[in-house]
Amino acid sequence: MMTTLQIFIELLKTLPKVSMVYILTALFSLPFGILGALAYTRKNSFVRTILSLYTWIFRGSPLMLQLLMFYYGLPLIKFAGYSITLGPYQAGILTFIINYTAYFIEIIRGGIDSIDVGQHEAAKVLGYNYWQKMIYIILPQALRRVLPSLGNEAISLIKDTSLIYVLSITEIMKRTKELANTYYIISPYICSALIYLLLSFCVDKIFKIIESKNKIRL
């Protein structure tokens, strides 16, 4: 029988795998989300239609279903006799990046749309082109406004990483169930909850610090 401390340490051993999924998702989905939001605001009807369809599909369908589709579904699709087969980590990370990019596009697009029209006019007077206006004037203000929403998504991502167990990846929840089923005790679930709460607290604290440093002072 394992002690509660031993169980806690055993669950912590799965953190590198969870951290890899988390970091790579954040590293790629946020820049893609910014680029997608900027592309959406260009008023190109074709691009807006494609982005709207993309965000509708990936925000409207369950993340678990998307994981299963990328891992188990893609190999079933054959094109010219070839199919795409991804490993569990590849499928998991790719799915998370695509899913969270859809959310970030909508969040950042909303932030850009909330900027007063006077800011756009001021940029025009200064002779800025579209990209200069967005990079130096509009986007910094928009990101400042959506920081709380980005923080919420960052915390949601911590919890969503538990879904990669459906790809047979040994992460916190999968190991928790294994230990609970082996020893018939509740402490693995308590330890797992504590780990998720600690991770969420750390991410929330980081965003609170960022928000305080970027707070508009009247």
Image (cartoon, rainbow, N blue to C red):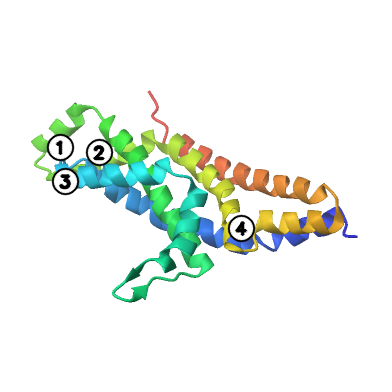
- Mark nearest the camera among 1 and 4 is 4
Point out the tag, 1 or 2, that comes first from the N-terminus: 1
Pointers 3 and 2 in contact (C-beta within 8 Å): no
Viewer-nearest residue: 191 or 198: 191
Q: Is residue 75 left or right of residue 181?
A: left
Dot 3, crowdedness within 10 Å: few (<14), some or many (≥20)? few
Give residue 46's mark: 3
Indicate the amino acid at tag 3: Phe
Point out the tag, 3 or 4, that comes first from the N-terminus: 3
Residue 186, percent from left and from top: 82, 47
Indicate the amino acid at tag 1: Ala
Indicate the amino acid at tag 2: Ile
Viewer-nearest residue: 69 or 12: 69
- Mark nearest the camera among 1 and 3 is 3
- Mark nearest the camera among 4 and 2 is 4
Q: CA distance from mark 3 to mark 2?
A: 23 Å
Q: Secondary structure at mark 1?
A: helix
Residue 15, percent from left and from top: 64, 60
Q: CA distance from mark 1 to mark 3?
A: 26 Å
Circle 2 residue? 138
Circle 1 residue? 123
Point out the tag, 4 or 2, that comes first from the N-terminus: 2
Viewer-nearest residue: 107 or 186: 186
Q: Secondary structure at mark 4?
A: helix
Residue 50, percent from left and from top: 24, 47
Circle 4 residue? 165
* Quarter of the figure that contains the C terminus: top left
Q: Image quadrant of residue 7? A: bottom right
Q: Residue at x 15, y 37 (%)?
A: 123
Q: Is residue 79 visible?
A: yes
Pointers 1 and 4 in contact (C-beta within 8 Å): no
